[in-house]
Image: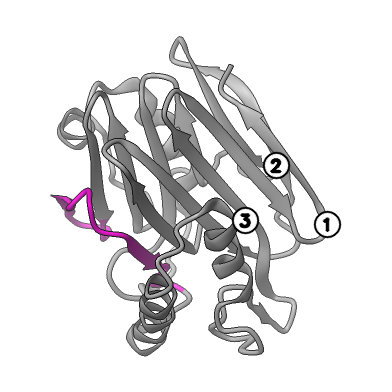
Amino acid sequence: MCTLTYIPLGESNYILTTNRDESPRRVASYPARQIINGFVSIFPRDKEAAGTWMMYNETGYSLCLLNGAFVKHTHEPPYKKSRGLVVLEYAKYKSSIDFILTYDFSGIEPFTLVIIRNNGKRQPEELRWDGKSIHYKCLDSEIPAIWSSSTLYDHKAQCLRNDWFDKWKCNKDFSVESILNFHKTAGKGDEINGLVMNRNNIVKTLSVTQVRKLDEEVLMYYEDFHDKKNIELNLK
């Protein structure tokens, strides 16, 4: 939800991993299979707002939400709906372009969506809603990438985290274990900007969620840092 990495593997595989930085009071349920718009999806759910920050849909895409667009915005409630519901509602649309042209974004707090579509060809997409306009682009599918939520990490902090990611990439170990280790240890000791952060127990890293698209298998891994438990769930 607040830190996301994309790792391409081979021609069509990838690993998408996100750390959820949130108030400890925002409890989440573990990932489960749900029918969304007639298709099976896997996602954890925020119990308070009923939305999610990461989902895989059997039609062939992964979707991850980060709070904020480009820079930290002024929080001006009330908002029409939780941003996590946008992730679930995306499933109603045939494509990101269809979503952009049809969906009513008004009254929703700024956010960033990263979508990885894989219908024979892997294609990462980035969509940012800044409260007034949509900013959309297709990304290079061969380049690993990192995102940090603009609501928690300013430009300087994002550059620092990008440096950690660049150093990690130099190891050229893009295994599931290596990327999970990066999400748990990068910036260790820095409770403000580390990938596992804790800002006076007001906002802290609560969990890590990972989508693994490996050939014909799609699996979601979820680890709760408070309960110290993890699960792996296949699409089928």
Residue drawn at point x = 67 percent, y = 71 percent: 204
Return the residue nearer the eye: 58 or 80.
Answer: 58
Specify the amino acid type for callout 1: Lys
Q: Residues within 10 Å of mark 2 (few under 14, many from 20)?
A: few
Residue 124, located in which quarter of the rendered image? top left
Residue 168 on image: x %, y %: 44, 74
Specify the amino acid type for callout 3: Val
Disc nearest the viewer among 1 and 2: 1
Work out whether mark 3 precedes mark 2 in sequence or the reverse, and give the earlier one: 2
Which residue is denoted by mark 1 in the rendering?
A: 228
Magenta span includes 132: yes
Residue 39 on image: x %, y %: 46, 14
> Does 110 appear above or below 96?
below
Q: Residues within 10 Å of mark 3 (few under 14, many from 20)?
A: many
Residue 73 on image: x %, y %: 35, 72
| Label 3: element kind | strand
Which residue is denoted by mark 2 in the rendering?
A: 47
In the image, which residues are magenta? 129-151
Question: Marks 1 and 3, how far apart in space?
Answer: 11 Å
> Does 230 appear above or below 177?
above
| Label 2: element kind | loop
Question: Marks 3 and 2, how far apart in space?
Answer: 17 Å
Work out whether mark 1 precedes mark 3 in sequence or the reverse, and give the earlier one: 3
Return the residue nearer the eye: 81 or 112.
Answer: 112
Which image quarter is the C terminus in? top right
Tell whether label 2 touches label 3 (CB within 8 Å): no
Question: Marks 1 and 2, how far apart in space?
Answer: 19 Å
Residue 208 numbered mark, or none = 3
